[in-house]
Image (cartoon, helix red, strand yellow):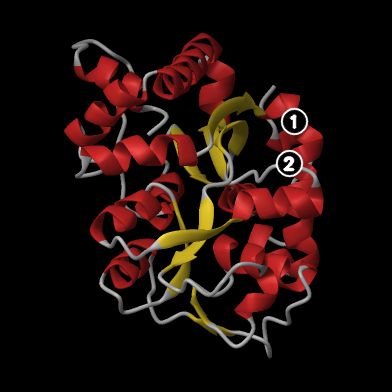
């Protein structure tokens, strides 16, 4: 969504050196990286650490999207964390970022994720879970924008319960490093001018989306990212789009990854990435 102005500009240029592909799941992006066919990629922050620690030569360029995760659903009895006791909460995949992050917040708010709540993983992807909540098959789940707004358009009984970025800030005093913009090491080193042009264009696109949500929403529908204009319009301010170079926030990134490392080192590939992880 933050890149939509750039996507639109590239579609009107015949001789661009860049081509953007939009895929359904982060695992599909990782497959392209393993095959060496992705020069740049956008994927979850924890997955960027995994790919680096597993030896794939991709560096972290920027954080273009911050916390977009919400606990939401049709249960109107939830007003604070204590109200979650005894509830069933759906998550898309055990051990993935939303699961670990939500478990961490439960614990920090005095709720044992093993005994005080039931965490349900019966819907394997974020799209499956979104459809289930929209259809009333799940009362409450952890899901990200823009799917939150899309579901709320389909089911008027659904509402956000907690903004997990805000809840994270209360506990950690730092925003969620949720999404990573990364680049292949040899491309970054051998095509620095083109890389910097892409970085500038991506930042400018994100700024334009935030300043022109109505026009951005039209493009988001035009390019098939969301099927509904109103859902796109409402998703933009809730999606926390802010393009920040990784070299400017190294400490925040390390603090974020350290939380996951302490809970389960495997989530970030077994260790905190070294200083070469950041593109400078």
**Quick one: 129 or 250, which is closer to the camera?**
129
Q: Is residue 8 above or below residue 268?
A: above
Q: Position of residue 268 (x, y in %)?
A: 67, 57
* Residue of label 1: 249
Callout 2 secondary element: helix
Q: Is residue 175 above or below residue 112?
A: above
The residue lying toward the viewer, choosing from 181 and 129, is 129
Check whether the beta carbons of the residues at disc 1 and disc 2 lie within 8 A of each other.
Answer: yes
Q: Quadrant of residue 81?
A: bottom right
Residue in the image at 76% along x and 51% along y: 170
Residue at image location 39% in from the left, 73% down from the top = 124
Residue in the image at 41% along x and 76% along y: 139
Looking at the figure, which quarter contains the N terminus? Answer: top left
Is 77 rendered above or below residue 200?
below
Q: Which mark is residue 37?
A: none
Name which residue lies at 30% across and 60% down.
Answer: 156
Q: Residues within 10 Å of mark 1 (few under 14, many from 20)?
A: some
In this rendered view, identify the residue nearer to me: 230 or 183.
Answer: 230
Q: Percent x, y for residue 154?
A: 24, 58
Quarter containing the C terminus: top right
Q: Is residue 125 left or right of residue 245?
A: left
Q: Is residue 92 visible?
A: no
The image position of residue 261, as x and y in percent, is 76, 61
Q: Which residue is mark 2?
A: 253
Crowding at mark 2 (Cα within 10 Å: few <14, some 14-19, many 20+): many
Q: Secondary structure at mark 1?
A: loop
- CA–CA distance in space, label 1 to label 2: 6 Å
Whole-percent x, y for residue 171 in the image: 79, 55
In the drawing, does residue 80 fall left or right of residue 171? left
Based on the displayed image, in which of its 4 quarters is residue 118 positioned? bottom right
Q: Is residue 275 left or right of residue 211?
A: right
């Amino acid at each position: 969504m933050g890149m939509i102005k750039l996507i639109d500009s590239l579609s009107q240029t015949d001789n661009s050196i860049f081509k953007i592909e939009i895929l359904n799941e982060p695992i599909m992006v990782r497959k392209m990286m393993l095959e060496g066919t992705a020069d740049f990629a956008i994927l979850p922050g924890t997955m960027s650490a995994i790919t680096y620690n597993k030896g794939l030569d991709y560096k972290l360029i920027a954080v273009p999207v911050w916390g977009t995760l919400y606990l939401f659903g049709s249960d109107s009895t939830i007003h604070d964390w204590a109200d979650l006791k005894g509830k069933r909460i759906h998550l898309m995949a055990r051990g993935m970022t939303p699961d670990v992050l939500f478990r961490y917040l439960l614990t920090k708010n005095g709720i044992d994720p093993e005994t005080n709540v039931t965490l349900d993983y019966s819907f394997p992807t974020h799209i499956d879970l979104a459809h289930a909540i929209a259809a009333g098959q799940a009362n409450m789940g952890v899901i990200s924008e823009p799917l939150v707004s899309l579901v709320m358009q389909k089911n008027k009984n659904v509402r956000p319960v907690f903004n997990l970025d805000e809840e994270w800030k209360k506990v950690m005093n730092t925003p969620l490093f949720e999404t990573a913009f990364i680049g292949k090491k040899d491309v970054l080193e051998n095509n620095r001018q083109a890389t910097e042009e892409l970085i500038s264009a991506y930042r400018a696109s994100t700024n334009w989306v935030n300043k022109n949500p109505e026009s951005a929403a039209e493009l988001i529908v035009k390019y098939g990212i969301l099927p509904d204009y109103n859902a796109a319009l409402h998703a933009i301010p809730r999606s926390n789009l802010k393009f920040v170079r990784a070299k400017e926030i190294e400490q925040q990134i390390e603090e974020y990854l350290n939380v996951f490392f302490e809970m389960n080192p495997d989530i970030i590939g077994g260790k905190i990435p070294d200083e070469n992880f950041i593109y400078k």
